[in-house]
Amino acid sequence: MKVMVVGSGGREYSIGLALKKDPNVTELFFAPGNGATSQLGRNVSYRTYEELAAYAKENGVELTVVGPETALVEGIVDCFRAHGLVIFGASKAAARLEGSKIFMKNFLSRYAIPTARYIETSDVKQANDFIDTLALPIVVKADGLCAGKGVIIAKSYAEAKEAVSDMLSGKSFGDAGRGVVVEEFLDGYELSVFVVCDGKDYKILPAAQDHKRLLDNDEGPNTGGMGAYAPTPLIDATLYKKVEERVVKPTLLGMQQENTPFEGVLFIGLMIVKNEPIVLEYNVRFGDPECEILMPLLKTPASELFYKAATGDLKNLTIEFLDRFAVAVVMASENYPYSSSKPSEILIDQNAHSELEHTHISYAGVSEEDGKLYATGGRVLLCVGVGESIKEARDRAYLLCGQVHFAGKQFRNDIAYQALRQ
């Protein structure tokens, strides 16, 4: 099977790595890919989705897997399907679950899916009046896509009102902030639950936990994610059942009723409050860095999972995962997330160590020049460790971190701390 992966980050690299090991896959394409994906397959540049669809058709691509949310929100799935191509991902209409926080919150309300108390508005006074009814801290979200950064957790009423004003004026996030959601802050712990869907049937993947803050002890600014681990012991069979009955089933049924059946990956961001699941957000693709730990745990061939989901045949798939744990540590550039950093050559020690056999690197913000890899993005790469316990996987991931060098590298030293202190 010839497979194409759309995207250029660590998420897409990790999907590609799983497909590269898949005996069903004969050729692999990345559109556009990064400096390291060319080691796994062929990088393809393109200007429009129509152009990419034509390339896929000409080259006999039998399955396309979409990584990033922007392509989904812009309608790449609709474009490929119009050309008769098999593609794994959400339609443009279904992608509104991530593309518009206002749509998402109103959808939750319509189908009585648990979520924080909120208001959606483009009126400053209405937002400010609602802010005055809430306890601190207060959450303010821009409506549109902001690369994971459109959420402000305000510690004062003045800060919340300033965030609303900046968003609605276009100062903070441009057009993405022309509508806002203001909601109550939930005090609990976060979980990421991923559900592969074919419009009707679904498969729930092992729950993961992401670490959003830049620094140890969950301090510093929010980022796209500094590391993750799975499966997490912070969820048990009872909580999985609550998530399935109260969130997954009504979401898929609601999308069917709105004539926008959900296909692809439903990423449910949950806050667990007193062992009750409350939906913080939906995303319509794999999380990054969560994808980098779920892919190495997947025992079922990745091509089968994606193809059956893309062709409405999940009911005939038995999905299996390794009885292992995975931990990923993000290595970021010196100035991340504040500004770009100077390109720096990536050097990897070749020290032989038996524990390193259970590790690998997923490359993200890298470019290639004369056979050398350079750190050019914010989140440069992820060091991934797999083990029979979270501690073993964590120790292996950090052992690999010690082997990787580039100027200004930074990473957290406490990924999976919440699980390890249980």
Image: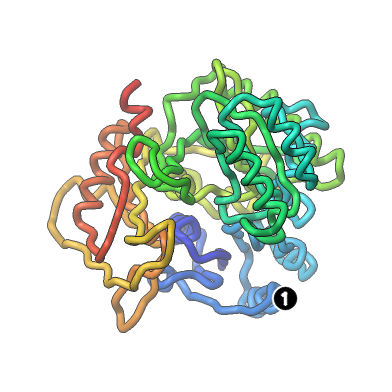
340 or 239, nearer to the observer: 340
Q: Is residue 21 visible?
A: no
Residue at the spot of label 1: 50
Residue 72 point in image, percent of width and height: 68, 58
Q: Residue at x 27, y 47 (%)?
A: 358
Query: Which color scheme is applied?
Result: rainbow
Residue that extends furthest to the bottom in the rendered view of this protein? 370
Q: Position of residue 300 (x, y in %)?
A: 50, 45
Q: Is residue 304 left or right of residue 322?
A: right
Secondary structure at badge 1 equals helix
Residue 357 higher or lower than 350, as above or below = above
Q: In the figure, 95 relative to 195: above or below?
A: below
Q: Quadrant of the N terminus?
A: bottom right
Q: Quadrant of residue 403?
A: bottom left
Say which residue appears at 50% left-offset and 60% top-offset. 12
At 42% from the left and 43% from the top, the residue drawn is 213
In this rendering, does residue 94 appear at all? Answer: yes
Task: Return the residue found at the far front.
Answer: 158
Give the image location of residue 350, x and y in percent: 16, 62
The residue at the point 20 percent across, 52 percent down is 402
Residue 144 versus residue 21: which sits nearer the camera? 144
Judge left or right: residue 260 versus residue 48: right
Q: Mark 1: few, some, or many residues within 10 Å (few <14, many ≥20)?
A: some
Name the foreground residue: 200 vs 216.
216
Left or right for 146, reference 415:
right
Amino acid at circle 1: Glu
Please tell me how many numbered marks the rendered image carries. Answer: 1
Quadrant location of residue 126? Answer: top right
State the quadrant of the C terminus.
Answer: top left
Instruction: Give the image location of residue 31, x and y in percent.
Output: 55, 71
